[in-house]
Amino acid sequence: MAILDSLLTWFMKKRIHQIELFMKYPHDVQEEWFQSLISSAEATEWGKKYDYNSILTPEEFKNRVPIQDYNSLKPYIDRMIKGEQNILWPSDIKWFAKSSGTTADRSKFIPVSEESLTECHFQGGKDMLTIYFNNKPESQIFCGKSVVLGGSSQINSFSSDSYYGDLSSILLRNLPFWAEFKRTPNLEVTLLPDFEEKIEKVANITIHENVTNLAGVPTWNIVLAKKILEITGKNNLLEVWPNLEFYTHGGVSFKPYREQFKKLIPSDNMYYLENYNASEGYFALQDLPDSEELLLMLDYGIYYEFLPIENLYDENPQTLGLHQVELNKNYALIISTNAGLWRYMIGDTIKFVTLSPYRIQITGRTKQFINTFGEELIVDNAEDAIKKASESTHAIVKDYTAGPIYFKEGEAGAHEWIIEFEQQPDNFETFCKILDQTLREINSDYDAKRYKNMALQFPVIHNAPAYTFFQWMKSKGKLGGQNKVPRLSNNRDYLEPILDILKK
């Protein structure tokens, strides 16, 4: 194992120079990937439809190929699921990531090619370790094991030769051999479809292991941590795993969870790094310690475009290339990938916080916002307000969601929040006031609508009992994996069933 550890360390040191190269020459790298993607797909059905053979520039590509969403690509993906090949991408595609970025009822099946597995998702995972070792060369994580909470995957009903599951489960089933040596528990347990059974078994197995690092969505890692403390009777995870030093997380904003992890892992030496890895691709990772900025990874087989959020609903919206973006403006992310997603709008919004190198922050979802009254409230606003209210009242928020209360005759509208606390605020009324006031300070449109309660009244905020969101997720069969609570909605589709739980 010492030889393996030495080899891994050598590869990581070599990779850091390649990362520095694309940071120095970002536009050249993106241009190379654009040309590579177009030439690779020339002979596919999609490439012939749009005559990729004659596309020479990104401008021609944008003018010829419309922006896509899942519904527009679904007929092609359905055929691929049934076994047809060379449709969107030339290599055989046998894996499909079941995407459920929120608890929406409709499932999306995102094609995962061999190239996207190796050049994108796995490369992102390796780069996360590269960055970590570069920032903390004295790390001992390879002396122990990693715990990754995966989803479940199964053979789908369309073809005996194509498979689907959560992205995490697809990655786990295709891990290189060296990574499997460093993981616990075994695949059979990690991929159990029943989440509650899985948590119980993972906890009972891993408490006897030397766990040095964790990975996964914060929500579900906290559930596992609590089960471990319940079983062992310990006060925190360091009493179970004294060598625990690293947690890589993604899927949701870490802001609401930071204080909970400080209690679970009370060490100033615990290292946290965020990644931006979706079913559609691995896009960015945190390369600086104690920072909320994510380095946009430019050599993973993805060509990026950026759609200004104010042009989102234009008839023929014009996107920007990397060289055209500006600081602190919200953009919808458009990608073309080595899995055959062409000019695909993934539904996330980002902003650039530095341009040399290109570092971003995730600001929300194109469909996760509240704009019923012209207030244009995005997830980034909500996270900042929750953080300020929590800090001011010593609260720890576990989960939350919010949506509109519509106008009634003679009454202004409002926002309705359901918040579940891990630690109750000193004063709930003060928490609510600070949340509202912070939203008014950071969002001028919200503030304008709140002026004298003319369009928006003071928000209705419910203090939900423990396990409210767990019950709701369980009722929808959305426990574990990459499933997460939607933060904001422009309708009441999420609010109403959770309010029903509160009434019981």
Image (spheres, rainbow, N blue to C red):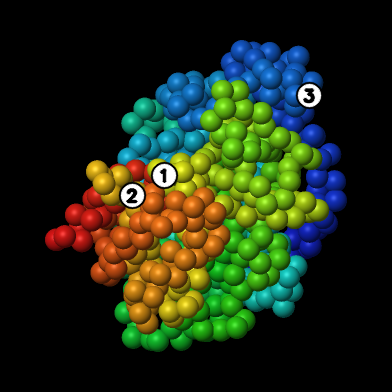
What's the residue at 49%, 76% (across, down)? 391
Q: Residues within 10 Å of mark 2 (few under 14, many from 20)?
A: many
What's the residue at 64%, 33% (across, down)? 336
Q: Residues within 10 Å of mark 3 (few under 14, many from 20)?
A: few
Q: Nearer the viewer, residue 160 or 387?
A: 387
From the image, tell me which residue sits under label 3. Answer: 57
Mark 3 vs 2, N-terminal side? 3
On the image, the x and y values in percent for residue 174 come to 53, 47
What's the residue at 45%, 56% (across, down)? 451
Please identify the quadrant where the N terminus is shown: bottom right
Q: Nearer the viewer, residue 477 or 460?
A: 460
Q: Nearer the viewer, residue 357 or 339?
A: 357
Q: Residues within 10 Å of mark 1 (few under 14, many from 20)?
A: many
Q: Is residue 69 positioned above or below 298 on the image? A: above
Among the 4 quarters of the image, the one containing residue 503: bottom left
Amino acid tagged 2: Gly
What's the residue at 50%, 65% (across, down)? 438
Circles 2 and 1, Cβ within 8 Å, touching? The answer is yes
On the image, the x and y values in percent for residue 15 come to 77, 56
Please identify the quadrant where the C terminus is shown: bottom left
On the image, the x and y values in percent for residue 428 come to 34, 75
Q: Which structural element holds mark 3?
A: loop
Horizontal arrangement in the rendering, residue 259 relative to residue 399 (left or right): right
What whole-number distance in Å separates the C-alpha atoms at marks 1 and 3?
Answer: 41 Å
Check residue 373 in the rendering and tell me which mark sits there, or answer none: 1
On the image, the x and y values in percent for residue 228 come to 37, 76
